[in-house]
Amino acid sequence: MDRFARIYVLHNLLNQRRHPISRATLEEKLECSKATVERAIEDLRDYLGAPIKYDRKRNGYLYDGKRDHTYHLPGLWFNASELHALLIAQQLLANVQPGLLESHLNPLQQRIEKILKLEQVGSGDIAQRVRILTHAARPVTAEHFQSIASALLQGQRITIDYRSRGNDEQTRRTLSPQRLVHYRDHWYLDAWCHKRQALRSFALDSIRHLRHSSEAAKNLSADALSQHFSQAYGIFAGQASHTAVLKFTARRARWVADEQWHPLQQGEYLRDGSYQLQIPYSNPTELVMDILKYGPDVEVIAPAELRQQIKETLATALKNYQ
């Protein structure tokens, strides 16, 4: 019987008995020595917080009956690799948006770390071992995030006051949440907008006020969401109506060839060692930003209007240095 199994059996023995259990009985039930029984009791009491007490008069161990609630073992019986993976996942979530789910994740992290110490299979100090860097992230209030997540999972509508960065206007929308999206260090909500009678994406950091509704949300199929949001480029939705043809220098080819810009992209190496990438898109805004970051290592071959937009943007930027 391994260490975890022994603790589990010990808990069940104590949990099922109203009277103290002698150490000799525990040695028999756990199939181990006196010293091992004492270690199991210590582990269960000191590491997992079980209310074990020793009754000297009746010479046995039992759970403290004065407690106002029944003790339960932490529901995390995994092997070491699974526990480490859970802690890394927790660290990823914590770094996506510091404080966003901290109150909910901390108890989970503390329980996992206790079990790791108990098993002596490595430190739970993942924060010092895993580093996640974010860039230009816009903070989201924990209250808004949790309210939206709750409405999403419970199938409820919400009403929001939303400020658009594009025109700096604030509008009130009633939404049927469909899914939360974390994209480029920002949180978005894909939702059916009852004002526009269409699917829209909303940046969570632009939501000013939020109210729950008791009315059931309109639910769209996964296929409908994919068709609307997956064909265009980046965060912009809609049917792709253009195809960008980009040519990258040989110096950059080996990087770009391993990158996925779009699920439906097509790429090939050319004879001179350069790399040509074809990308479907509708709204060019985000695509233009991604093209510009490659500077002289990329050329827009087609379409003509995208090539001209890049040319004008570079010319305007150059004026800042003249």
Image (cartoon, rainbow, N blue to C red):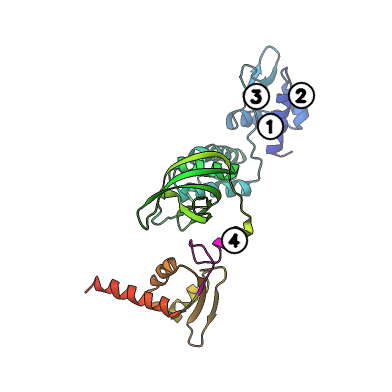
Split into 4 quadrants, where in the image is the C terminus?
Answer: bottom left
In the image, which residues are magenta?
228-242
Percent x, y of residue 35: 68, 30
Which residue is label 2 attached to? Answer: 25
Instruction: Please tell me how crowded label 3 is: few (under 14), some (14-19), or many (20+) other residues with Cα within 10 Å.
Output: few
Query: What secondary structure do most residues of the magenta stretch adopt?
Result: loop
Task: Compute the Cα span from label 3 to label 2.
Answer: 23 Å
Question: What is the count of numbered marks?
Answer: 4
Between marks 2 and 1 in the image, the one whose residue lies nearer the viewer: 2
Circles 2 and 4 in contact, beta carbons < 8 Å: no
Name the residue furthest top. Answer: 57
Percent x, y of residue 151: 55, 42
Question: In terms of secondary structure, where does tag 2 sit?
Answer: helix
Between marks 2 and 4 in the image, the one whose residue lies nearer the viewer: 4
Which residue is label 4 attached to? Answer: 226
Instruction: Please tell me how crowded label 4 is: few (under 14), some (14-19), or many (20+) other residues with Cα within 10 Å.
Output: few
Q: Give the mark nearest the N terminus, 1 or 4.
A: 1
Q: Give the mark nearest the N terminus, 2 or 4.
A: 2
Q: Give the mark nearest the N terminus, 1 or 3.
A: 1
